[in-house]
Amino acid sequence: MSNSIYRIGLFIVLYGTNGVGKTTQAKLLADWLSELRYEVQQIKFPLYGLPPTGPRIDRYIHGDGNGGTVNPENISVKEFQELCAENRRDGAGLIEDWLADGCIVIAEDWTYGGIVWGMATGVPKKAAYAMNTDFIREDAKILIDALPFTKEERHIHEEDSALVARVRNLYIDIARAEGWPIVNGNQDRIIVHSQITDIVRPFFK
């Protein structure tokens, strides 16, 4: 078996509502590709640790960490989505560098996350799309659709089940309209992983 590391430069994004197993599937996919001798990098948005936008997003979603209220700056939903778009823009350079180095980049959420969450929270469709233009395009978009089976405490979005349902429906509508593959995330995680590998396998022939 060759010890060569394969470098092809590929951007794969896993989409879906929070709590459907994207992190688990990103790790399983990364491990599978690493075993095949591909250079792999993972990234998850938003990047909470990336200033100046990351900490502000974290406070909006989770509060100040000391029992304080969420969204302490009292910013609007449109301002929040603009903040998230800027966070992606700030992180895009890292993705570009990895791709230029031939890595396969596996991301949890990207521009469509902003579009869907923006529209679900009341941002007009045209504005939601406009603030998410001029970004790196995905080579593969995969929607993991499921009823969320985990929920983060003190999360401004995950505590609103009606909002999560709107997000899920918007994802399904967009995926069907644009022809993304949709994987049933309520299956056993190994079955989900197998279906995801079947989707991306043609890129490596």
Image (cartoon, rainbow, N blue to C red):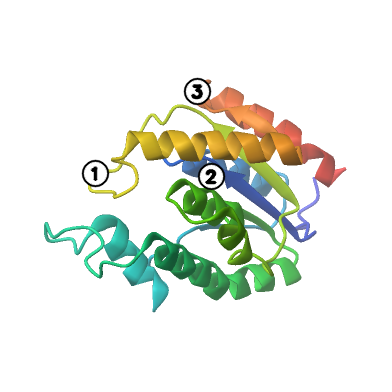
28 in relation to 6, above or below: above
Query: Looking at the image, which is closer to me, 67 or 5?
Result: 67
Q: Position of residue 153 (x, y in %)?
A: 24, 44
The single residue placed furthest to the left in the displayed view is: 67
Q: Which residue is mark 2?
A: 27
The percent coordinates of residue 50 (x first, y second) are 42, 73
Residue 116, given in percent of the width and then of the height, sits at: 54, 48
122 lies above or below 201: below
Q: Quadrant of the N terminus?
A: top right
Q: Where residue 20 sits: x, y (%)?
A: 46, 34
**Which residue position holds label 1?**
153
Q: Looking at the image, how many numbered discs can be counted on the residues?
A: 3
The structure residue drawn at horizontal position 68% and vertical position 71%, both measured from the top left corner, is: 96
Considering only order in the chain, which callout, 1 or 3, is on the residue closer to the N terminus?
Answer: 1
In the structure shown, which secondary structural element does the residue marked by tag 1 occupy? loop
Q: Residue furthest top?
A: 187
In the picture, measured across the screen, residue 96 lies left or right of residue 81, that is right
Cα distance in 3D space between marks 3 and 2? 17 Å
